[in-house]
Amino acid sequence: MKTRRAKALAVASTLAVAAMVVTGCSSSGADSAEGETFDLTWTSYTTPEGYYSMAMDEWIEIVEERTEGRVTIEPFYMGSLCATMDGLACTKDGRADIAYTSAAFHPAEFPLANVVTVPFVAKDPVAQTATAMSLYENNEAYAAEFEAQGVHALYFAPVTTSILGTKEKAEKFEDLKGLSVRSTARMLKALELGGAKPSAIAVSEIYESIENGVIDAWSSTGLESAVTEWNLGEVTSHMTDTKSGSFINVVAVMNDEVWKSLPDDIQKIMIEASEEVWGNLEGKYLDAIFDETCDRAAEQGVTLSSWSDAESAKWEAAVGDTLVNDWKAEATAAGASDVEGFYADYLAELEAATDKSDYVAPVEYCLAR
């Protein structure tokens, strides 16, 4: 599927979450050459209506307008150019110049960055994304993972905290027992430890799988995507924030050789586009984003709820240190050094970013309206 928006989208009313952007990486671009043009492609696994796609479209519009046609970027949605799990490979080998991907899709290639897949650690996805930004800019081992894969990070974007979507109410930890739940990354193990029966299926297959009784419920999807992109309220009338925290994030990566071939002024414009699309999103912008999400949830007849801290603590206790120890072992086996030291740095950065964040989870926002 290949489409282009006819005009720039109003990102302030459509993006689902705030995010942080990489702005401080050193530039090694060529000097500006008048008349030199660059025709680029961007592969995405999201639908055209999804908030990541809307951000992508806005980013593209800014770059194309400010470079006055010297750069054109063609987006491909829903894996029409490269499949979800192939985005990194496509960017590395040149089938695409830019891709949306995630460390969660490539744990062997990004062993340290895969720390974002450990639930119950980062309760604030915006703070988690700010942490990823800081590490990419300042932590040599973290940045080296991207360099080793031949990609440059244009920006990081969060996935909001995992929601549990069910047909019946699931208000307490015990309701997980025996529930067949779609999930992804380490949330699969977290659900198993909580007594559920996890199922690893693609987000695009959730709707039909619920309809056909293949699974009972879903998780590892944010409220915004669930109701605005995938219309999951039509098949699961209850959506609950279990307060399990962040479980994944997304990064837009560009082939590093392509990035370095761009003139300095074009690199600067791309950094500015990232700042404007994903950065400084607060107050009235978040209100507009979450209001749309709340309205769509209401239209789909969704009942929203949130676990108490005590119920969430039961699940966290059942998980214990299992998942963070699994990540540490996998990162070490993949060749990462001083994993303990990196994790300490990650937690320190995360704590500082959380203290600065004003993020309010979308379910909490909707319930307070």
Image: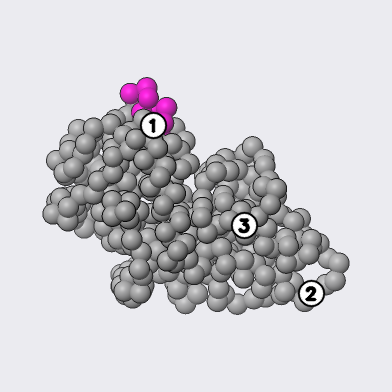
Asked whether residue 331 is in view, the answer is no
The residue indicated by pointer 1 is 234
Which residue is painted at 50% across and 74% down in the image?
137
- Answer few, some or many: residues within 10 Å of disc 2's Cα (few below 14, many 20 plus, some between 14 and 19): few
Left or right of 260 on screen, residue 198: left
Q: Which mark is residue 32?
A: 2
Task: Indicate whether residue 296 is drawn in magenta.
Answer: no
Residue nearer the viewer, 294 or 337: 294
Q: Is residue 265 above or below residue 99?
A: below
Give the mark nearest the N terminus, 2 or 1: 2
Kind of residue indicated by mark 1: Glu
Q: CA distance from mark 2 to mark 1?
A: 51 Å
Q: Is residue 64 visible?
A: yes
Point out residue 161 in the picture as x, y percentages from the top left corner.
34, 53
Residue kind at label 2, given as amino acid type: Ser
Residue that appears at 68% across and 46% down = 4
| Display colour scheme | one colour
Residue range corresponding to the magenta coloring = 206-213
Q: Residues within 10 Å of mark 1 (few under 14, many from 20)?
A: some
Q: Could you tell me residue 327's position as x and y percent?
A: 32, 57
Front disc: 2 or 3: 3
Q: Quadrant of the N terminus?
A: top right
Q: Residue furthest right?
A: 35
Residue at x 45%, y 64% (from the top left corner): 284
Residue marked by disc 3: 58
